[in-house]
């Protein structure tokens, strides 16, 4: 059902500054946006922009209500999953017990049909289905960094085994690997459809809710991590190490230094051959 991750959505206190950051740091192009009405996803309304770089995009949202947001930080807000037919997907997921927000899908400024899940049925996480316009299949790659796709969104969870079972049971997921994480605690990777999620149980789970998954990071796919590093560094980005590490599912991973990514956790990823 799930074909790819179309984008990660971020909240920002200053849309213009965030747009300028993506343009400078990723060589992104502003593909469109504008005022957004009050909605389930953004109760106060606000304005947004879709930044395109390589073969991916990021949606940036400046809500009218900026309480809790900081001017120099990107806060992860949602994940958009692509499906071939949004009506068929909604029917199948509703039959499995999922709920959706609003009266039906809406078409955004990019021509994408979008419908958010009710977050009470997705572990408190904002997620939406996306049906792309037909012309999107032949769309040429964007400018900037040669990002090939989004391999996964990562979530912090209080109970890793329970979180794995949720994806396996609800999305016919396959637990493909994991173990002790380098930062303490443990993690797991679950594939479902043609997408993936990384689940992270920190060493200290005090204060975490058992039924809420917290958005942690995004993994961007590149053809070669070391080659991409130079282009990133030329744009002012820094990394936490001089070379990638290889995780339990044979992905080469290198995190950006969050001091250069507006406080948001992101990593480059080379998939195994």
Image: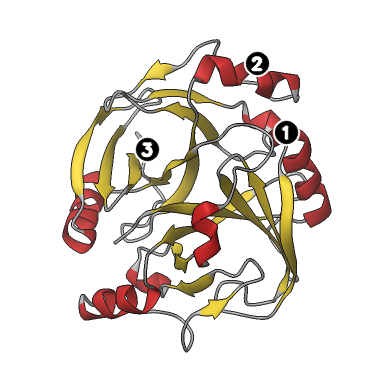
**How many neighbours does mark 2 have within 10 angstroms: few (below 14), some (14-19), or many (20 or more)?**
few
C-alpha separation, residue under disc 2 versus residue under disc 3? 35 Å
Tell me the element at label 2.
helix
Relative to residue 4, is residue 147 drawn left or right?
right
Which residue corresponds to the image point at 24% horizontal and 55% vertical from the top-left?
167
Residue placed furthest toward the bottom: 103
**How many neighbours does mark 3 have within 10 angstroms: few (below 14), some (14-19), or many (20 or more)?**
few
Tell me the element at label 1.
helix
Which residue corresponds to the image point at 32% horizontal and 61% vertical from the top-left?
211
**How many neighbours does mark 1 have within 10 angstroms: few (below 14), some (14-19), or many (20 or more)?**
many
Check disc 2 and report the residue beneath it: 230
Residue placed furthest toward the top: 242
Whether the residues at callouts 1 and 2 have beta carbons within 8 Å, the answer is: no
Residue 25's disc is: 1
Which residue corresponds to the image point at 51% horizontal and 73% vertical from the top-left?
113
Number of callouts? 3
Hey, which quadrant is residue 204 in on the image? top left
Image location (x, y in percent) of residue 180: 27, 26
C-alpha separation, residue under disc 1 versus residue under disc 2? 12 Å
Residue 204's disc is: 3
């Amino acid at each position: 059902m799930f074909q790819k991750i179309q984008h990660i959505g971020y909240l920002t206190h200053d849309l213009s500054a965030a747009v300028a950051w993506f343009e400078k740091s990723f060589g992104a192009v502003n593909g469109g946006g504008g005022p957004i009405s009050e909605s389930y996803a953004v109760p106060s309304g606000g304005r947004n922009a879709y930044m395109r770089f390589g073969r991916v995009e990021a949606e940036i949202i400046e809500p009218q209500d900026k309480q809790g947001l900081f001017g120099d930080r990107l806060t992860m807000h949602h994940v958009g999953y692509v499906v071939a037919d949004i009506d068929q997907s909604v029917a199948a997921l509703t039959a499995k017990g999922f709920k959706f927000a609003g009266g039906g899908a809406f078409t955004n400024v990019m021509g994408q049909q979008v419908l958010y899940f009710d977050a009470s049925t997705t572990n408190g996480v904002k997620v939406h289905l996306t049906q792309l316009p037909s012309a999107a299949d032949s769309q040429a790659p964007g400018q900037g960094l040669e990002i090939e796709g989004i391999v996964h969104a990562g979530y912090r969870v209080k109970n890793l085994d329970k979180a794995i079972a949720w994806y396996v049971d609800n999305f016919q997921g396959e637990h493909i690997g994991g173990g002790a994480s380098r930062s303490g605690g443990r993690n797991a990777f679950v594939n479902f459809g043609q997408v993936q999620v990384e689940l992270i149980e920190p060493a200290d789970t005090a204060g975490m809710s058992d039924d809420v998954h917290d958005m942690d990071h995004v993994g961007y796919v590149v053809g070669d991590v070391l080659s991409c590093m130079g282009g990133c560094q030329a744009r002012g980005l820094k990394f936490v190490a001089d070379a990638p590490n290889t995780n339990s599912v044979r992905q080469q991973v290198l995190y950006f230094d969050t001091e250069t990514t507006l406080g948001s956790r992101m990593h480059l990823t080379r998939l195994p051959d």
